[in-house]
């Protein structure tokens, strides 16, 4: 029985083990294609999506970092799988928790920063002062750029979490109201939920794309 609206995001289970987090790794069971009939529509769709993302990420990150696009494509597919599975009934939405999103964002940002400051120190120092900044404003620009760099993992994590929570809360509100709704209002609630489901599927794709693109842009600065 739900105690409040946010209890739908509670990862605890009745056996005192957070087994709901196991749904995070269900995608790895479905995605391997070694036993599938090849080629098929799903394989062709994944291949086209992967090649398209590879071309776009390679354009953003540059040709100097070979293999980095594979990391960003894997990140995109991992977040997309978890976002999409969260729309299915009785499956825990792991991407609606900061534990999941911060685990992805913080090591990514920290590794990029460490690599940049260790190997390209002068380049990273030059990024703190934009070109054409007046000498009077240089100390303030260093402070602003430093703060903006420090809040990057938090903004990545909170953006994904907030977008996933917002849509699920709307669907939970409509679902709770549909139990006591009259027969005249019920078709409108069902129609609204269908629209929200399509909207949430678009949000799941867009947020996975935004997370991976921003991570690629942060890596391209190094």
Image: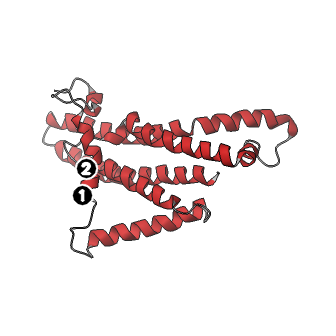
Q: How busy is the neighbourhood of tag 2: few (under 14 within 10 Å), some, or many (20 plus)?
A: few
Front residue of this view, candidates 169 and 195: 169
Does residue 167 appear in this view? no
As drawn, the residue found furthest toward the left would be 183
Q: Is residue 119 above or below residue 7?
A: below
The one nearer the camera, 28 or 173, is 28
Q: How is the image coloured?
A: secondary structure
Q: Residue furthest top?
A: 3
In the displayed orientation, state which residue is furthest to the bottom. Answer: 39
Report whether residue 3 is seen. Answer: yes
Name the residue beneath numbered marker 1: 30
Is the residue marked by circle 1 packed among few (<14), some (14-19), or many (20+) residues within 10 Å? few
Q: Tag 1's secondary structure?
A: helix
Residue name at image x 47 percent, y 56 percent:
72
State which quadrant residue 47 falls in: bottom left
Q: Position of residue 18 (x, y in %)?
A: 24, 32
Q: Position of residue 208 (x, y in %)?
A: 42, 51
Residue 179 x %, y %:
14, 35
Residues marked 2 and 1 touching at CB (< 8 Å): yes
Question: In whole angstroms, how far apart are the C-alphas of marks 2 and 1?
Answer: 7 Å
Q: Is residue 190 left or right of residue 127?
A: left
Front one among 188 and 79: 79
Q: Give the residue at mark 2.
A: 26
* Residue 1, horizontal then vertical, whole percent: 16, 26
Q: Quadrant of residue 134?
A: top right
* SS of the residue under disc 2: loop
Residue 179 appears left or right of 133: left
Q: Nearer the viewer, residue 174 or 206?
A: 206
The quarter of the picture where residue 12 lies is: top left
């Amino acid at each position: 029985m739900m105690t409040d609206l946010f209890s739908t995001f509670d990862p605890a289970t009745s056996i005192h083990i957070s087994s709901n987090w196991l749904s995070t790794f269900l995608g790895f069971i479905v995605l391997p294609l070694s036993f599938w009939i090849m080629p098929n529509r799903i394989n062709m769709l994944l291949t086209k999506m992967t090649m398209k993302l590879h071309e776009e990420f390679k354009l953003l990150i540059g040709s100097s970092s070979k293999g980095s696009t594979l990391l960003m494509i894997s990140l995109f597919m991992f977040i997309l799988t978890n976002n999409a599975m969260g729309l299915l009934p009785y499956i825990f939405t792991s991407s609606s928790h900061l534990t999941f999103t911060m685990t992805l964002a913080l090591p990514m940002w920290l590794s990029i920063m460490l690599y940049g400051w260790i190997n390209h120190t002068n380049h990273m120092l030059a990024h703190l002062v934009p070109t054409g900044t007046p000498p009077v404003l240089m100390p303030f620009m260093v402070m602003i750029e430093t703060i903006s760099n420090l809040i990057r993992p938090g903004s990545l994590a909170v953006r994904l979490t907030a977008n996933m929570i917002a849509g699920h809360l709307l669907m939970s509100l409509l679902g709770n109201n549909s139990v006591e709704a009259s027969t005249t209002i019920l078709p409108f609630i069902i129609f609204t939920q269908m629209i929200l489901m399509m909207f949430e599927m678009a949000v799941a794709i867009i947020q996975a794309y935004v997370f991976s693109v921003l991570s690629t842009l942060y890596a391209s600065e190094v």
